[in-house]
Amino acid sequence: MTRGADIIAVIILIALAIAVIVYLLHWLYRRSSKEVSFVRTGMFGEKVIISGGAFVLPIIHNITQVGMRTLSLTIKRAGDKSLITKDRMRAELVTEFFTKVPPDKKAVSTAAQTLGNRTLDPEHLREVVQGRFADALGEVAANMTLDEIQENRGQFVKEVTKIADESIGHTGLALETVSLISLDQTPIEQFNPANTFDSQGLTQLTEQIEARKKKRNDITQDTKISIENKNLETIQKELEIKKNEEFSRYKQEREIAIQKANERTETIKQRSEREREAEEAEIRSQEEIEVAKISQ
């Protein structure tokens, strides 16, 4: 009995030991996920875990979680926050930046050192990168006119992406894409005449507006004159057609009258000729009768 009890006790102890070990392994072994990596520091140095896991011992190890999800950040610049362009215009725009910590050990390590657990909180991460992205927009806009930005949106986005990506590179973040959602000129009411840049832009804008008004007025007046000239030309052509119609009618009537007169003249002439011939025939007849009488 004693030997059997000892065996059972040993089995129970082994089972408890295994349970404790499994529990400790479950508790001490930390796994990463697709959305969260971590960096373990302390004994044995730094270890970056992107896909897999590692033992984390209390007191001797410390971990920093790093979010791997893509952050979408919309930056809007309008009103007095609008961007000043190369030609001193103000541009209102809405852009969307997509950034994340790339699945690279160096990048994850850098993000853990510079950002810490803020990569897990989108709002805190926005506070870190928003100013840098806004600066990139302002820097590129300052080197392009408003028309150039509109006509070369792809180039504008490319330059912004380059500068913004460099500005956040030391944080371990990487810029995936930048989208220029909308672009428009700031209303003229937002220009501050007391501001040097705004006053220059306001002067140019006023000149452009007045030039466009003059051009529109010139086009309107030229169109009006063109229409009036066309109407006058139409009237003149109509009168010319009517005149030609009258001349043609008069000419036709005159020709008919002449033809009728010629026909009457010819008729009279023919009648006279026949009467003359008849008289001559009668005279010859009388002469012949007289000759006949004398001969008898």
Image: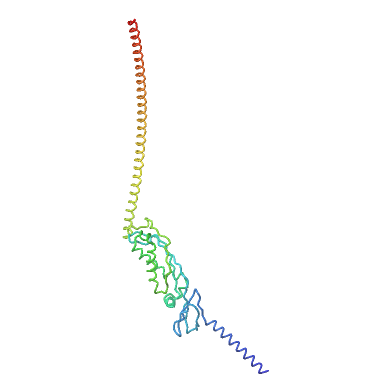
Q: Nearer the viewer, residue 245 or 264?
A: 264
| Residue extending furthest toward the bottom | 2
In the shown orientation, is residue 226 left or right of residue 117? left
Q: Nearer the viewer, residue 284 or 264?
A: 284
Image quadrant where residue 9 sits:
bottom right
Q: How is the image coloured?
A: rainbow
Image quadrant where residue 255 sits:
top left
**Is residue 45 depicted above or below 100 in this figure?**
below
| Residue extending furthest toward the right | 1
**Is residue 57 depicted above or below 230 in this figure?**
below
In the shown orientation, is residue 227 left or right of residue 120? left
**Is residue 112 depicted above or below 237 in this figure?**
below
Residue 232 locus on image (x, y percent): 35, 38
The quarter of the rendered structure image containing the N terminus is bottom right
Residue 249 locus on image (x, y percent): 37, 29
Q: Nearer the viewer, residue 240 or 203?
A: 240
In the shown orientation, is residue 199 left or right of residue 99? left
Residue 41 locus on image (x, y percent): 45, 82
The quarter of the rendered structure image containing the C terminus is top left
Marks counted in the figure total 0
Residue 18 locus on image (x, y percent): 58, 86
